[in-house]
Amino acid sequence: MNAPTATRQRLVSTAGDLFRRQGYHATGLSQIVKESGAPRGSLYHFFPGGKEELACAALEASAAQFRAGLLAEMASVDTLEEKVRATFDFVARELETSGFEAGCPVATVTLEASSKSALHAVCAGYFEQWRKFVEGMLVEGGIETKRAVGFSTVMLSAIEGAMLICRARKSTEPLEQVRDALTAMLPKNA
Amino acid sequence: MNAPTATRQRLVSTAGDLFRRQGYHATGLSQIVKESGAPRGSLYHFFPGGKEELACAALEASAAQFRAGLLAEMASVDTLEEKVRATFDFVARELETSGFEAGCPVATVTLEASSKSALHAVCAGYFEQWRKFVEGMLVEGGIETKRAVGFSTVMLSAIEGAMLICRARKSTEPLEQVRDALTAMLPKNA
């Protein structure tokens, strides 16, 4: 990787990590530059749109990393029930590994971005992308499309909500309880 | 109401509103004092613990107001299915009335409070209080306790997650979709 690309990547990953851990507002551009070790002028060179543009890149990188991790997890399971359980377990492990400090970056930015910010549309795009991922998993597992749409909406919302509750409780138990209850509610035509 | 009580209440309601709309970090104590119209010295008089203590009072007031509104909504419906639908519709209306600016104050504080903050335990307490409220509604509607515990965990998580997605999309559709899908999944021994 050439030096400019590496600098850009360091800025993006540092920003993503800080946004997840301490929030979007609490993270200043100077902290991102300092912790990434990037040259001072590089931020506006790579992100002339400033914090919002950097946040978009950080969300994109976090989502890609999350997707790759989840797909790797899925590779070792077969049935739909196992896949649903693996999704919750992957999210729970990510939360626990960070000491319950790093939750969903899209959730954090959604709550903190001003209602006039273009970031909301970006966040909505990720939520829909994830819901469709779950819908595809359900349809592939034999659930008819209409029920898969409804169940995927419940499952994505419940994962996002349970992550919040896990962070407040500093425990993965809420995700495990939702996992068990939702698995038992899986449509039976699977 | 005497003057000191009124001043305290103005500080609490202004803080609660600002935390919900613009987030916990983005809201400074000076803005709260200014927008509440309270005398400058009153904040530390009523809240010697500063922002965290004020946040606890604001969460308590928001939760009490939410509970009163929800109970009023419940008074006009009879069946369990209607109660579940009314819960989602009440949350959706609250969001829509604020122009999708004011979400769940407990969610906002959970994501933004430092992991060392005492506020996390306070937030966890509200999440559990709300789950128990839903559990009670389900048991009263004829669902056996074990299933009511599981379903209430899913329902509370899904409401919290759907509120997030509604804010990103600036639409109540995600809450409506989760409401319809979850209502169809209600245990049938009701």
Image (cartoon, coloured by chain):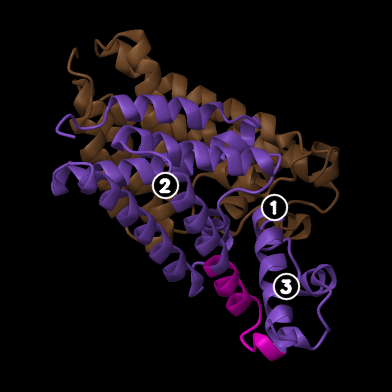
Chain colours: A purple, B brown
Q: Chain of mark 1?
A: A
* Front one among B66 and B172: B172
Q: Callout 3, which amino acid?
A: Arg
Indicate yes or no whether the magenta region holds residue A54: yes
Determine crowd level at label 2: few under 14, some 14-19, many 20+ residues with C-alpha closer than 10 A. few
- Residue where numbered disc 2 is placed: A75
Q: Chain of mark 3?
A: A
Q: How far apart are labels 3 and 1 at the CA level?
A: 16 Å
Viewer-proximal residue among B133 and A14: A14
> Mark 2 and mark 1: span between their CA atoms?
29 Å
Q: Quadrant of residue A133?
A: bottom left
The residue positioned 80% from the left and 89% from the top of the image is A41
Q: Nearer the viewer, residue B115 or B129?
A: B115
For disc 3, the neighbor class at 10 Å (few under 14, some 14 to 19, many from 20) is: some
Q: Residue at x 27, y 29 (%)?
A: B84
- Please give the name of the residue rendered at 23% of the width and 20% of the height, measured from the top-left corner: B187
Q: Label 1, on which residue?
A: A21
**Residue B42 falls left or right of residue A101:** right
- Looking at the image, is mark 3 or mark 1 earlier in the sequence? 3
For the residue labelled by badge 1, is the local secondary structure a helix, a strand or a loop? helix
- As displayed, is residue A173 above or below residue A48? above
Report which residue position mark 3 lands on. Answer: A10
Image quarter hosting the N terminus of chain A: bottom right
With respect to residue B177, does A185 lie above or below? above
